[in-house]
Amino acid sequence: MLGWALTFLIVALVAAALGFSGIAGAASSIAQILFVVFLVLFVVAMIARAVRGQPPM
């Protein structure tokens, strides 16, 4: 149980350091761009599978 508490403490400290340093805004915009890129790749992969005659999933 102490191990979990220390793990969450470290995660909270890293999140606070990134959040209060101004990196969060840049990371947010990068995350939005990556979301769109991977969404497009997912759709392309599903279309490619459908063209080959395989089920979408």
Image (cartoon, rainbow, N blue to C red):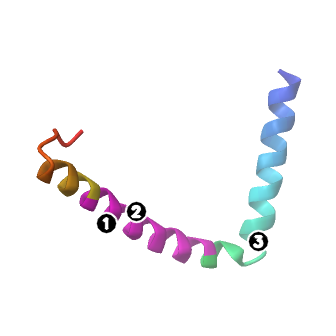
Q: Secondary structure at mark 3?
A: helix
Magenta stretch holds residue 37: yes
Direction from residue 15 to residue 29 in the image, left or right: left
Residue at the image point whose x is 25% and y is 59% from the top: 43
Disc 1 target residue: 40
Residue at the image point whose x is 28% and y is 55% from the top: 45
Magenta stretch holds residue 33: yes
Q: Nearer the viewer, residue 43 or 22?
A: 43
Q: Nearer the viewer, residue 50 or 29?
A: 50
Q: Nearer the viewer, residue 55 or 23?
A: 55
Q: Are marks 3 and 1 in contact (CB under 8 Å)?
A: no
Check the image and report above or below for 24 versus 46.
below
Comparing labels 3 and 2, the label whose residue is closer to the camera: 2
Q: Amino acid at mark 2?
A: Phe
The x, y position of residue 42, in whole percent, is: 32, 56
The x, y position of residue 21, in whole percent, is: 78, 75
Q: Are marks 2 and 1 in contact (CB under 8 Å)?
A: yes
The local crowd at label 1, few if under 14, some if 14 to 19, many if 20 or more residues have their Cα within 10 Å, is few
Q: Secondary structure at mark 2?
A: helix
**On-image quarter of the C terminus:** top left
Location of residue 28 (image quadrant): bottom right
Find residue 20 and name its label.
3
* Outermost top residue: 1
Q: Which residues are magenta?
A: 27-44
Residue at the image point whose x is 19% and y is 43% from the top: 56
Direction from residue 38 to residue 16 in the image, left or right: right
Q: Secondary structure of the magenta portion, mostly?
A: helix
Q: Earlier in the sequence, mark 3 or mark 2?
A: 3
Distance, label 2 to label 1, CA atoms, is 5 Å
Location of residue 22 (image quadrant): bottom right
